[in-house]
Amino acid sequence: KMGDMATFDKALCLNEDPGLNVSNDRCTGFGQAMTDMGIAYLGQIEVPDDNTTHYTSIVEKAIGESGDWGGYGILLSGLSQLPSALELKKLHANFVMSSFDTNDDLYKSLETGDVLFGIDQQPFLQGYLPIPILTHAATDKQYFLDQSIKSGPRFVIAPPTDEKADCEVRNFPVCPVEGKSIITRSLSPIGTTQPSASIQPSVLPTTQPSSSMQPSSFPSFDLRPTLEIVQTRGYILCGLRE
């Protein structure tokens, strides 16, 4: 992604947590991608996340050049080092930089252009969502028909809306959103304990609700931009929104 968004011929990965396998894997994957694109990968550099002066000294020594560092692309393996990396960019303004994970500081850096993108790991979609989906498959024999859920990871190149940012800060609770709903009369409204008689045992319905239904009975929610969910019978049912 970085190679598609900017022009540079040398790349390195700054790792603030080299003892963590996932951080090492992030740098390894980045290095392989750079090599595949014909960009010289200078390797993984271990950096502190709590000492900007030491951080700057380590990276400057590793690169071994003065000036604005045009032609360099740097990936941060995590956001705890972002404040130090931003200070480094004040000294060497022309290197391009991206990072794993997202937070408010990253969103501000996207707006200023100091960072190309963040990588949203979608912890709710990747970690939690499979549980209710599998629960429905096992207990109610309800499945999606020819549907996929885009669970990430996802490249973030612009800040989210205030509403979506608040949703992320609160660890991805459901967030009200206007739009086309996929919830049908086959699903029970929130708060009911028994499914309606029209629920089909083998599929999760995907047609529109009848005009006779009250809109308040079937609220539409947006967990991420491509997903809508509603709670019924103590579980969470999910479906893709057009």
Image (cartoon, grey):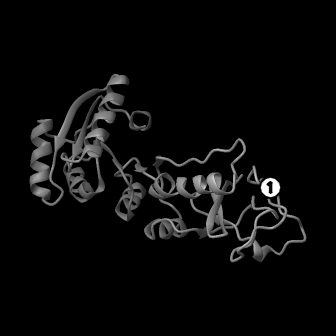
What element does badge 1 sit on? loop
- Give above or below for 217 relative to 157: below
**Residue 190 picture location, percent across and down:** 69, 74
Quarter in which the N terminus is drawn: top left
Q: Which residue is mark 1?
A: 200
Residue placed most toward the observer, 121 or 104: 121
Q: Residue at x 47, y 65 (%)?
A: 168
Position above or below: 87 against 220: above
Quick check: can you spot residue 139? yes
Left or right: residue 73 versus residue 66 is: right
Q: Measured from the top left, where is residue 55 in percent x and y?
A: 13, 52
In terms of depth relative to the viewer, which is nearer, 109 or 139?
139
Q: Residue furthest right?
A: 212
Left-right relation of 18 to 206: left
Towards the viewer: 29 or 94: 29
Percent across and percent down for residue 141 are 69, 52
Q: Does residue 234 lie above or below 153 as drawn? A: below
Q: Residues within 10 Å of mark 1 (few under 14, many from 20)?
A: some
Q: Quadrant of residue 185?
A: bottom right
Residue depicted at x 54% and y 69%: 163
Please tell me which residue is depicted at 30% across the width and 55% down the height of the picture. Answer: 79
Residue at 48% across / 51% down in the picture? 126
Task: State the image quarter where residue 108 is shown.
Answer: bottom left
User: x and y percent of residue 199 in the render?
Assistant: 80, 60
The amino acid type, in three-letter code, at marker 1 is: Gln
